[in-house]
Image: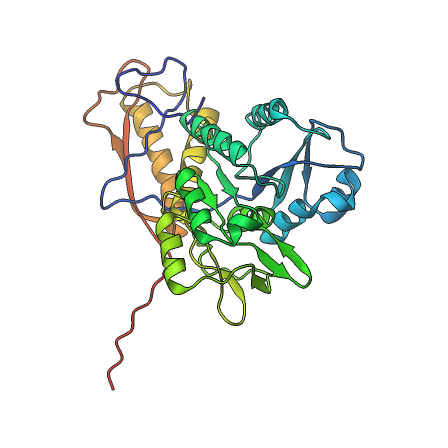
Amino acid sequence: MPGAQWDPTALPTRPGIYINFKQAAAVAISGGARGTVAIPLLTHSGTAAAKAFYTVTTEAEATELFGAANIDSILLALQGGAKEVLVYTMPTTPVDADYVDMRAAFDTRQFNVFVFDGEFDAAEQAKTKTWVIDNREEGKHFIVVIGGDAATDADPTAGNARSTLNKDDYIVNLIEGGVIGTETYTSSEYAPYIAGLIAGTPINESVTYRVTPLEDVTKRLSNSQITAALASGSLVLTHDGEKVKVEQGIVTSGKKIRSIRARQAIATDVARTAADNYIGRLNNNADGQATLIVAIKAYLETLEASGVLVAPVVALDPQKPSVGDSVFLAVSYLEVDSIERIFLTINI
């Protein structure tokens, strides 16, 4: 699969581009989001059939396909900022095998963020972690947003334990629910909004301190609880006295969502461009290698101009000779992070 990882001790045989990201101490990879949220819809009463895909961009489309009573998660994802929602309709009474089929079906589709339809199932979250890791190794990159139920939302240590259990660069764990008027959401039920927020945020921006439509959170955390949650890799919603906002945009491994999304965007874009324009078309000589290097460098420079990264360098890897049908490139750059902490010294 284009964009898959490669092992220098056992090189893949299929034609394609293989990308390894190695993080040095001074280099982190930054990023953003692209717009499509994937949701396996549990119930539907409209014109949609079971075990089928539908792409929706409006409430009217969702209502006609799935029925007004079944589209809360879709509307939250769109409200969060998703360009579109890729919906897979689950059977009326899904069993384990149906979740296996669902994941296999999504393997054949492109999307940026995956989230469940408001449900909380620890066993399915564990299987989803395995799924996202398998996809990453095969060259498909997406974020997963998970949450808990009312009981775990009431105890931040339980939410933090879920972050530890699902620790991964590609997983976001929301540990608080929220309130709008008379409506109360668990963290799993509000996770689709966070998924839409991540998907809709440009790759040169962060979701940190983004304001949500919530009027309050289901449990306000103390400063020490927030600090412990962030250290655990949990996504926290904070009521600042006036509004509810995302405390910090992090994944369960503790890294920034912004950084991870750029890594995903670069891997996906470079692989797609190479597959469409260069693989099988360039000679593996000095001219062909130079053409490939210039193309990748030009792409990274567009991200540099947008404030995603700085100092991109693309060159032949001096440690691995590019001969036969294989080209080895060494790519480096520095991330541009968002300002998230401001320290003032005021002299009076």
Question: Which of 150 and 284 lies nearest the eye of the viewer?
Answer: 150
Q: Position of residue 30 (x, y in %)?
A: 37, 46
- Residue at horizontal 34 percent and vertical 38 percent from the top: 297
The residue furthest bottom is: 348
Horizontal side of 151 relative to 84 (left or right) equals left
Q: Could you tell whether 190 is left or right of 30 in the image?
A: right
In depth, the one of 151 and 22 nearer the eye is 151
- Tell me residue 3's x, y (percent): 41, 27
Position in image of residue 295 (x %, y %): 37, 34
Q: Specify the quadrant that holds the N terminus.
A: top left
Q: How is the image coloured?
A: rainbow
Horizontal and vertical percent position of residue 26? 23, 46
Q: Is any atom of residue 203 visible in this view?
A: no
Look at the image and tell me whether residue 227 can be seen: yes
* Number of numbered discs on residues: 0
Image position of 273 with respect to 191: above or below: above
Quadrant of the drawing holding the C terminus: bottom left
- Please say if 195 is above or below 98: below
Q: Residue furthest left?
A: 319
Left-right relation of 285 to 175: left
Q: Quadrant of residue 228?
A: bottom left
Residue in the foreground of this view, choosing between 254 and 121: 121
Residue at screen point 31% across, 25% down: 289
Front in this rendered view, residue 1 or 244 = 244
